[in-house]
Image (cartoon, rainbow, N blue to C red):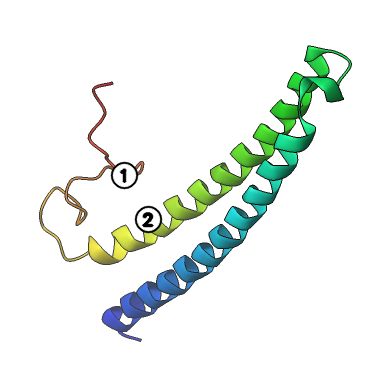
Amino acid sequence: MSREKAYLQMLESSATIQWNIAMILEAKAVEAEKVKQWTHHHIHSRSFDNHEEQLKETLSIHEVIVEMVEGLTKLENGLYSNLKAVLGSGEDEGGGGFGGMSGDGFDFGDDSK
């Protein structure tokens, strides 16, 4: 298989993975809306004996959401590496084919904060 065909196959696979990620995110958005509604109805001070128990419950919910976002971020960083290899392969510039984005992720221009 030629290098171009291999790169094309990598891009097609990345597009398929991105589609699947979009479907996952859509399902997660529906699930998040349900969790939000449940949380609004069940996580309030009247449901717990003290504030510490309420805080523990809300932190556990938050932890699950953060873990999901971290997992998706790792997945996207892996896809970024593949796309960087494909798109950056023919570039002689120092930008790496993505207009100056670093290898650690996307540069949103707010590094000065």
In the image: residue 61, left or right of residue 82: right
- Badge 1 density bin: few <14, some 14–19, many ≥20, Cα 10 Å: few
Nearest to N terminus: mark 2 or mark 1: 2
Quadrant, the C terminus? top left
> Along the line of sight, which residue is nearer the eye, 99 or 21?
21
Residue type beneath disc 2: Tyr
Quadrant, the N terminus? bottom left
The residue positioned 78% from the left and 28% from the top of the image is 57
Of circles 2 and 1, which is in front?
A: 1
Label 2–label 1 contact, CB within 8 A? yes
Furthest toward the right, the residue is 49
> Along the line of sight, which residue is nearer the eye, 68 or 98?
68
For residue 106, the mark is: 1
In the image: residue 97, left or right of residue 35: left
The residue positioned 26% from the left and 27% from the top of the image is 111
Write down the quadrant of residue 109 in the picture: top left
